[in-house]
Image: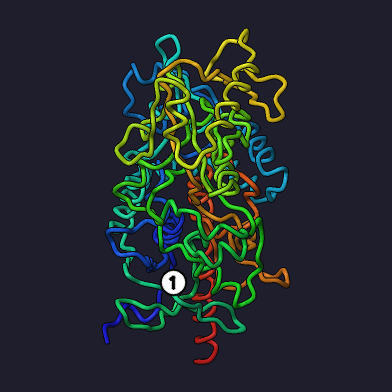
Amino acid sequence: MKKLMKKSQFDVVVVGGGNAALCAALSAREQGASVLLLERAPKAERGGNSSYTEGLMRFAYEGSDDIRALSPDLTPEEMDSDFGSYTEDLFFDDMARVTHNRTDPDLCEILVRQSNETMHWMVKQGVKFYPQFGRQSFKVDGRFKFWGGATLAAWGGGQGLVDSLYLAAEKKGIEIRYNAWVRDLISSDAGVEGVVVKFDGVTEEVAAKSVVLACGGFEANSEWRSKYLGPGWDLAKVRGSKFNTGDGLEMALKIGAQPKGNWSGCHAVGWERYAEDFGDLAVTGDYERDSYPWSIMVNATGKRFLDEGADIRNYTYAKYGRVILEQPGQFAWQVFDSTVVHLLRPEYSTRRVTRVTGNTLEELADKMDDVNRDEFLKTVREFNAAVTRDVPFDPTVKDGRKTEGLPLPKSNWANPIEVAPFEAYAVTCGITFTFGGLGISTDAQAIDTNQSPIPGLYVAGELVGGLFYFNYPGATGLMSGAVFGRIAGRSAAEAARVQASSNIHTAASAGA
């Protein structure tokens, strides 16, 4: 038998291999704990959903000085940008608004208040951040103007973030094992005492004084999606890791952990209609379709079905995937005219895109598979007639250029579809992560269904329940993972230290 461990027991075992798990491992190691990180994926696919992200982090900051402190390598030309500010009050407002005031107030306060501090802590771990000039800003009068409260991303995107954190973990003596599928928790009346792991095909037990679960939600489990999210969700595309199948949730619930949060909710976006069923690090970045605010979106009946301009992209994209999935055939088309195509995000120009073009609307309609042609042309005519053309179009703000008289309005950026050539892109639903999770205390300790803490068990990342309901502000997921990962690791290490001290005291008393 090939044994997993070099030690008979670790202070802290971290289950997972993404941003939250790595932050937990680094934080625990910072406290002097011996740490083992168990990543279910092979090394080439490590990082969980974090590897599939843009690496964008939402955090509170006051102005350009905060940006410079986190990105000290910016040139004078780059610093001459309108970074604006994103205060804690704005962050709180966004969290309350998009979750319909359901976000857990204690967890939300921790997330917001510790966001800036955590960014600086991540820089100390070796993560480099850089403004998202190409995706979170527009050039206005020669200067980049940032929008949407999400300004900095990890250098190299999600994979760059993950690589930086793994490098830090290796340097600090954290033991890392890949292909290590944790199947169960070892627990007793005294609490959690380790994990059962299948490592390279061999199942064994790993003892630990504390365990941190940071191994993702259940978005890659089609059965659970149907069970908790509802009918049709088994048909959604999975944007990220195929290894996020709810294992951590299942093993925690089995020992009495409290389910918490929006178990019927998830982060889901508009996605390439013919994308693979699961994320592929080599191509997944080509599949997101988030320029819909400049479009009209129609379903198989040829009709619009949502307000494409309800808010800026960062506050609607994570909920519109669900709406697309509810349409006939689980697809839609985003339709643009030539006056706005220069605003489309880069992934619209890749080879992996279902795009049709036409010099007339009739020609375009003929190429849009599975769409009612006549109804589509009627929809465009009615939409064009309803646009308030006296309001100027401005993509940098909610411009108030809307439609009037339609049963379903477009509240901003309502440009008529009338200047050829026309383009249309086929989209479906891509699920990112699930919102349902586990109840935790403010020190990230798991809570049971009797409202009591579970000794030795801590939680971070997508498994934290109660933060997000219905929707979320873009780029909050990685920030939450880092904030609560850091707390969970620190708390787990402290619990391990207390346990070790207690064991020494007990042994000394027995010897006496």
Is any atom of residue 131 visible in this view?
A: no
Rendering coords of residue 264 (x, y %):
64, 57
On screen, residue 209 above or below 492:
below
Q: Which residue shows up at 36% across the image and 47% down it? A: 284
Along the line of sight, which residue is nearer the eye, 15 or 8? 15
Question: Which residue reaches farthest bottom?
Answer: 511
Q: Is 295 placed left or right of 227 in the picture? A: left
Along the line of sight, which residue is nearer the eye, 380 or 504? 380
The quarter of the picture where the N terminus appears is bottom left
Is any atom of residue 437 visible in this view?
A: yes
Rendering coords of residue 60 (x, y %):
55, 34
Q: Which residue shows up at 29% across the image and 48% down it? A: 282
Q: How is the image coloured?
A: rainbow
On screen, residue 64 above or below 193:
above
Disc 1 secondary structure class: strand
On screen, residue 221 above or below 306:
below
Along the line of sight, which residue is nearer the eye, 224 or 367? 367
**Which amino acid is tagged 1?**
Asp
All told, the count of numbered labels is: 1
Rendering coords of residue 199 (x, y %):
33, 76
Q: Mark 1 — residue?
A: 11
Quadrant hosting residue 367: top left
> Pointer 1: residues within 10 angstroms few (<14), some, or many (20+)?
many
Q: Is 490 placed left or right of 227 in the picture? A: left
On screen, residue 449 above or below 302:
below
Quadrant hosting residue 400: top right
Rendering coords of residue 429 (x, y %):
51, 48
